[in-house]
Amino acid sequence: MKLRFLVIGGGPAGHTAASTAAGLGAEVTVIERDVLGGAAHLWDCVPSKAMIATGGELAALDRAEGMGLEATGRIDPAALRVRNLSIQTHLSDDVKQLLESQGVRILNGVGRLVSPNEAILAHDGIEERVTFDAALLSTGSRPRIPDWAAVDGDRILTTRQAYPPPVIPEHLVVIGSGVTGVEFAHMFRAFGAKVSLVVSRQHVLPSKDPEVAAVLEESFVSRGVELHKGARAEAIQRIENADFDGIEVQCADGRKVRGSHALLAIGSIPNSDGLGLAEAGITATEWGTVPVDHNCLSVAPNIYAAGDLAGKLPLSSVAAMQGRKIAEHAMGLHALAHRHLDYDKAASAIFTEPEIADVGLAEADAFAVGRKIRVTKVPFAGNAKALISGDARGFVKVISDPVTGVVLGGSIVGANAAELISVLAIAVTNGLRTQDIVESLLVHPSLAEAIVEACS
């Protein structure tokens, strides 16, 4: 008898788990309330990066004069919306076609647990009771909206209401300077909007390398982004009078920041409500996540959680890998020797200009615990490909063990950093030494040569 595998939520974790399980012979049902691909395709990774890519083309036009060209550009919000939708539809259709070809049953609706082995699936106007041998909960998250922010979808927006907005804001006030906040600040400044960034700490990207944050701040300032550091927002007002029509963000220290629109980028909340966790014997944490072990298995011996719901690392790449590992575990493959997920070795990127990417051990974290490391840093200013491309901002930083030479981590700031970090990610994951990278024969001229130099 085939293993009956139920997936509630068809985002990166859900559809990857479904495909893997089906490929291994399971009888799979996926229920998704929006589109396959989930929030990653609808609101987060794909549409935001599509808009950033458009902004990048505008920025390239701004640099055209230095390349011996004359060029101008303008934003067409309607065309941008059509472009986002076409990319989303293409990717979602690809996922659907793959799952259908594997015999996966796909439902549009919502699911909730009613026992450790049963669920109610609401779809197509009916409620269907199903029994499963294993289930994956991968319902994602939603933007966090504090009590003091009266989101109206017009002037006070969440990130999901800005893909893109009906009009490009004249002056956007972005609240939150983490990864999402700085990406939106970069994006809308590239679109021509005046941007003010409310930074609750003393520098943007508080969880990242200070050197990395400094490069981004320098870029923001040079492009006219206003940085309000040490300003913790505590209220937003919509103001309409003869003198001003817009919003005002009030900060805890008394500062007030005005603009035409406000954008909240202050985190997310897992979608654990209404899943029937209690009926399955599962208790969510105070943050709304489902506690899981190293196999993403909850306290229920056949119910898994992944992605934002699992609360491990909010990256689509991590969610997809969790989905694959979960399917393998459910099908019994992990009785054999295998590699568990190591979240400390996950690469991540921030799609600002310049791009930022990192992986593995951070310099500050090593110093905090007194760990001896070797740190080498090479700027792109001396890289031939960077000079040819007209963008030599940023650097490569490699962190390695001073005795063995094993690559422990690294950061890259500059053009194509999200692609370049893959070299270091493979090294970190597989315990390669700096010498292994140095002895690799890479293309010349290429940006990757800076990684080799940093490993030398």
Image (cartoon, helix red, strand yellow):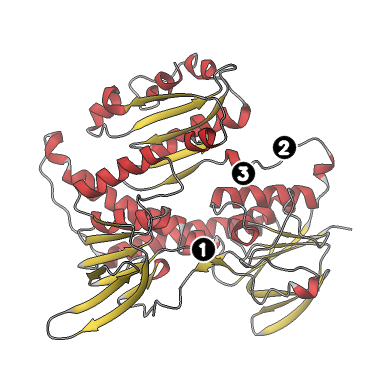
Per the image, the residue denoted by label 2 is 339
Q: Nearer the viewer, mark 3 or mark 1?
A: 3
Instruction: Find the residue positioned furthest to the right.
Output: 1
Quadrant where the N terminus lies?
bottom right
* SS state under label 1: helix
In percent of width and height, residue 49 lies at 39, 53
**Type of amino acid at the residue the image marks with label 3:** Tyr
**Type of amino acid at the residue the image marks with label 2:** Arg
- Quick one: label 3 or label 1, which is nearer the N terminus? 1
* SS state under label 3: helix
- Crowding around mark 3 (Cα neighbors within 10 Å: few <14, some 14 to 19, many 20+) is few
**Type of amino acid at the residue the image marks with label 1:** Ala
Q: Nearer the viewer, mark 3 or mark 2?
A: 3
Per the image, the residue denoted by label 1 is 39
* SS state under label 2: loop
In percent of width and height, residue 432 lies at 58, 23
**In the image, what residue occupies the spot 69% across and 84% down?**
126
Q: Which picture quadrant has residue 277?
A: bottom right
Q: Of residues 269 and 302, which is closer to you in this image? A: 269
**In the image, what residue occupies the spot 40% across and 19% down?**
453
Quadrant where the C terminus lies?
top left
Q: Which mark is residue 105?
A: none
Q: CA distance from mark 3 to mark 2?
A: 12 Å
Q: Where is 421 relative to 127, above or below?
A: above
> Count of labels shown?
3
Per the image, the residue denoted by label 3 is 343
- Quick one: label 2 or label 1, which is nearer the N terminus? 1
In percent of width and height, residue 76 lies at 23, 63
Apparent side of residue 400 relative to residue 85 in the rendered image (left or right): right
Q: Of residues 273 and 399, which is closer to you in this image? A: 399
